């Protein structure tokens, strides 16, 4: 099997003939307050797969995740250089509408963050304000069904979303993201605040969702990456010549290979628990 770890490229040998590339990251570099936090990342994200980002704290996983829908634009002092193509369009082109982009590339955060409103409104609010023309009741039901939450909440849609359990709240947030009919779901440690049963439910949900969506997930849990991800990207930090710590992509491999026969010594050491 051939693929280029250094450049994070998928090769035709590792993609089935039906796969296509959703994101093509070409030399993305991110600065915070003038200091490089993440350097020169090249990676291709295949469609309708789950890609996990793993690596020690501070290596830039969340920073890169936020590049895919320009969430870094909202962080004062953050600057992104390089090209990042989403379905062949450079999303760092100043002409790109980042609000529209974020509808196509949704985000689920580490801590479930439902609005302090009813379960129903949590789902219906954004589509309504964005002028959704279809039947909102149907959209709410469909989104909750897709998020594997409908059966648990169908009789209490008027209850507050914040009154649900942590795991249910996270699935509600996933349903809220799905209601915008995105193409891609970015997930930043979506299970880190959840118990093992809720974690398993969210993982199973992700496995179902990848039939329709491309998912990029940051996780600290390597077992989680090995359970759900098709591809895994390992990031690490290094010290620059100016003595500053910065992140970089070390290896991008099919998950099975990453965990059985990683190509780089650094990934092998991290996965075997020798550092990080
Ligand atoms: N808003 C910010 N302002 C300044 N520096 C930041 C900001 N966010 C992240 N950084 C820095 O950028 C680097 C990468 O951080 P990032 O959160 O992307 O890493 P990570 O791999 O996701 O870490 P973790 O696993 O701990 O969440 C770190 O050195 C961090 O301190």
Image (cartoon, helix red, strand yellow):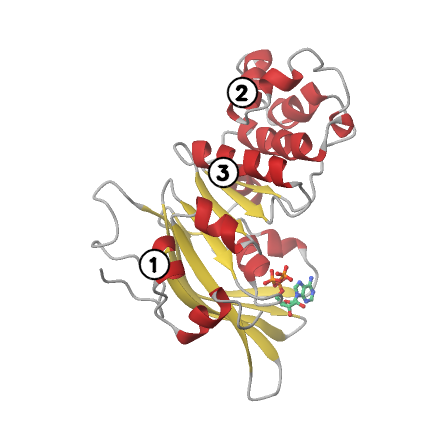
Number of the label disc, if any, that sits on residue 114: none
Is 41 drawn above or below residue 206 in the view shown?
Answer: below
- x and y, in percent, of residue 25 in the image: 41, 59
| Residue tagged 3 | 104
| Residue tagged 2 | 145
Q: Residue furthest bottom?
A: 241
Element under label 3? Answer: helix
- Tell me the residue at 60%/44% (across/down): 190
- Tell me the residue at 24%/40% (across/down): 18
Position of 101 compared to 214: left or right?
right
Q: Between marks 3 and 1, how big is the CA–CA gap?
A: 30 Å
| Residue tagged 1 | 257
Question: What is the total number of numbered labels drawn onto the structure image?
Answer: 3
- Please say if the residues under marks 1 and 2 sit with CB atoms less than 8 Å apart: no
Res. 3 image quadrant: bottom left
Element under label 2? Answer: helix
Label 1 CB-ligand 1 distance < 8 A: no
Q: Residues within 10 Å of mark 3 (few under 14, many from 20)?
A: some
- Tell me the residue at 58%/57% (across/down): 62
Res. 266 image quadrant: bottom left
Element under label 1? Answer: helix
The image quadrant where one finds the N terminus is bottom left
Between 245 and 222, the one lying in front of the other is 222
């Amino acid at each position: 099997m051939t693929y280029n770890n250094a450049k994070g490229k998928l090769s035709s040998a590792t993609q089935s003939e039906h796969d296509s590339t959703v994101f093509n990251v070409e030399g993305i570099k991110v600065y915070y307050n003038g200091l490089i936090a993440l350097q020169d990342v090249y990676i291709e994200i295949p469609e309708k797969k789950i890609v996990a980002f793993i690596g020690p704290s501070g290596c830039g996983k969340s920073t890169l995740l936020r590049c895919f829908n320009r969430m870094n634009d909202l962080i004062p002092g953050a600057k992104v250089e390089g090209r990042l193509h989403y379905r062949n369009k450079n999303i760092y082109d100043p002409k790109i509408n980042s609000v529209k982009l974020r509808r196509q590339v949704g985000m689920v955060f580490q801590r479930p963050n439902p609005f302090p409103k009813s379960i129903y409104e949590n789902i219906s609010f954004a589509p309504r304000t964005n002028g959704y023309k279809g039947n909102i009741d149907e959209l709410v039901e469909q989104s909750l069904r897709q998020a594997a939450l409908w059966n648990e909440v169908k009789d209490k849609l008027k209850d507050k979303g914040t009154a649900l359990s942590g795991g249910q709240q996270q699935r509600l947030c996933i349903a809220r993201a799905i209601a915008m009919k995105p193409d891609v779901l970015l997930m930043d440690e979506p299970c880190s605040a959840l118990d093992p049963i809720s974690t398993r439910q969210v993982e199973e949900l992700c496995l179902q969702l990848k039939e329709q969506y491309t998912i990029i997930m940051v996780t600290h849990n390597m077992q989680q990456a090995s359970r759900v991800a098709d591809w895994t990207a390992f990031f690490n930090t290094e010290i620059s010549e100016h003595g500053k710590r910065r992140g970089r992509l070390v290896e991008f491999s099919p998950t099975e290979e990453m965990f059985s026969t990683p190509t780089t010594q650094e990934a092998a050491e991290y996965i075997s628990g020798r550092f990080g």
